[in-house]
Amino acid sequence: NLKAFPENFLWGAASAAYQVEGAWDVDGKGVSNWDKFVRIPGKTFKGTNGDVAVDHYHRYKEDIALMAEMGMKTYRFSVAWARIFPNGSGEVNEKGLAFYNDLIDELLEHNIEPILTIYHWDLPQALQDKYGGWESREIVEDFRNYCITLYKAYGDRVKYWVSLNEQNIFTRLGYQTAMHPPGVKDDKLFYQVNHHASLANAVAIKEFRTYVPDGKIGPSFAYSPAYAATSKPEDILAAENAEELSNHWWMDVYAWGEYPKASWEYLERKGLAPQVEKGDFALLKEGKPDFMGVNYYQTTTFEKNPLDGVTMEGTFNTTGKKGTMEDTGIPGLFKTITNENLERTNWDWNIDPQGLRIGLRRITNRYGLPILISENGLGEYDKVEEDGTIQDGYRIEYIRTHLKAVQEAITDGVEMIGYCVWSFTDLLSWLNGFQKRYGFVYVNQHEEGEHDLRRIKKKSFYWYKEVIESNGEN
Ligand code: BGP
């Protein structure tokens, strides 16, 4: 017997500014690191950029009408920093502020609870140029100022806030694999950048208490629970090392203001531990979140990694062809392997609903914080049939099984705030263009050929509508 979903459970979907808005240079918006990065040849699938994306900037009313038709209770979106501060700091762009103002009002008019993500990867390029963006501590003050501006502008109406989206991913892809801006491979810098981002996260939360005292805020962490490849003790240790250095390294800092011990010692020995200044840990402890935002897509399975083994530089599958994922790891600590017990998508992401239940329980037991699933979903090729429909039964199956895992976790005692599917409409996949789709609503947007951006409800749209109507009983 499973417990029911809570009564005010936030059923929703999520997006990010760069992936949906388009209008990249409209109404005074400044250039972001992504606007620049996508113009470097070979960085994204067929050189796709977000200049237009799915043009949500101009079509948000149409998109919100579709959300309302579906009965969505919440919509998680992000603010483009460079719309508010074209140069990252300094003068506010009133037109940028007005856009999100209108978006928020439109959501509230349709009884959709806004969840606002402050930072979902698009950094004003001016700050990258000025002091290396996250590489400098200076960013903490600019981030503080940006946050306060948002709190003052929207804090009266927006009650749920996400501070940083997937700090572990944007720093890893930006500073270990060079797949995201600024396209660097530098392990030492990676940990330093993360320290700055954690400080910024803490400052965001600290200021939030003053400006939005009745709101709730937390980071969204990309949580991939670690499994051991075998029952060999060395593989179990590898999985523990990975859980600690790939997950607790961030979540412990969010929840407790501390880095996990063994990982810290390891990085110190290697000369990779970040430089910490006096007062940093006190500040980190002040940034305790109200909830842990969890973006869950898959688990990762680990085995022992020899001292001359693979590094974190290995790249992801951005080809859409199964079997093109590289193994990654830290020599001496752990390395990833393909879990043959699990199905995989065409992008080699394993499908593991039970891993979600396991992960939710681990977070609850370790941190005791309520959880918002801020992303979960299936990226696949979608096809418009001759009759104009999109039969994405595979997506329904993915979400249905993951929702069951959520309900099992609730039954296990996990406190859940809501569940945001990635994504509502199709949108730009950072490195995979428009071929890898996640939405309930198809958008006729492609790299080539005819693309009029029209919206088409997929089969999953009608299914999720019923899920929401029945509060998850469907
Ligand atoms: C998460 C990001 C999202 C989204 C999603 C799907 O890591 O927070 O922005 O992109 O992953 O990723 P992808 O588009 O690479 O399949």
Image (spheres, rainbow, N blue to C red):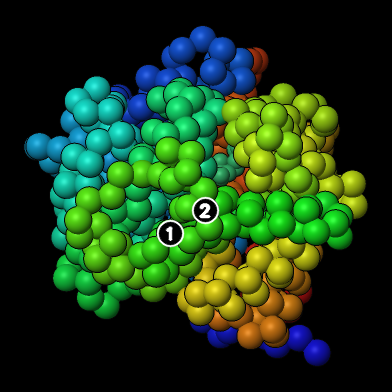
Q: Using the rendered image of the protein, determine whether residue 263 is visible from the camera's viewpoint.
A: yes
Q: Residue at x 63, y 85 (%)?
A: 413
Q: Residue at x 39, y 73 (%)?
A: 290
Which residue is more in the foreground, 273 or 474? 273
The yes-or-no answer for disc 1 within 8 Å of ligand 1 is no
Q: Which residue is mark 1?
A: 259
Q: Quadrant of the C terminus?
A: bottom right
Three-letter amino acid code of the residue under disc 2: Ser
Q: Height in image: 430 above or below 366?
A: above
Q: Which quadrant of the picture is home to ligand 1?
A: top right
Classify residue 256 by image quadrant.
bottom left
Q: Are marks 1 and 2 in contact (CB under 8 Å)?
A: yes
Which residue is more in the foreground, 263 or 319? 263
List x then y, in percent, for residue 259: 43, 59
Q: Residue at x 27, y 78 (%)?
A: 214
Which residue is more in the foreground, 153 or 246? 246
Q: Residue at x 90, y 52 (%)?
A: 341
Helix, strand or loop at disc 1?
A: loop
What whole-number distance in Å separates the C-alpha atoms at marks 1 and 2?
8 Å
Q: Using the rendered image of the protein, determine whether residue 463 is visible from the camera's viewpoint.
A: no
Helix, strand or loop at disc 2?
A: helix
Residue 263 shows which numbered tag?
2
Q: Height in image: 84 above or below 281?
A: above
Classify residue 291 by image quadrant.
bottom left
List x then y, in percent, for residue 324: 77, 27
List x then y, in percent, for residue 50: 46, 27
Tag 1: Cα neighbours inside 10 Å, few (<14), some, or many (≥20)?
some
Q: Quadrant of the N terminus?
A: bottom right
Which residue is more in the foreground, 274 or 347? 274
Three-letter amino acid code of the residue under disc 1: Tyr
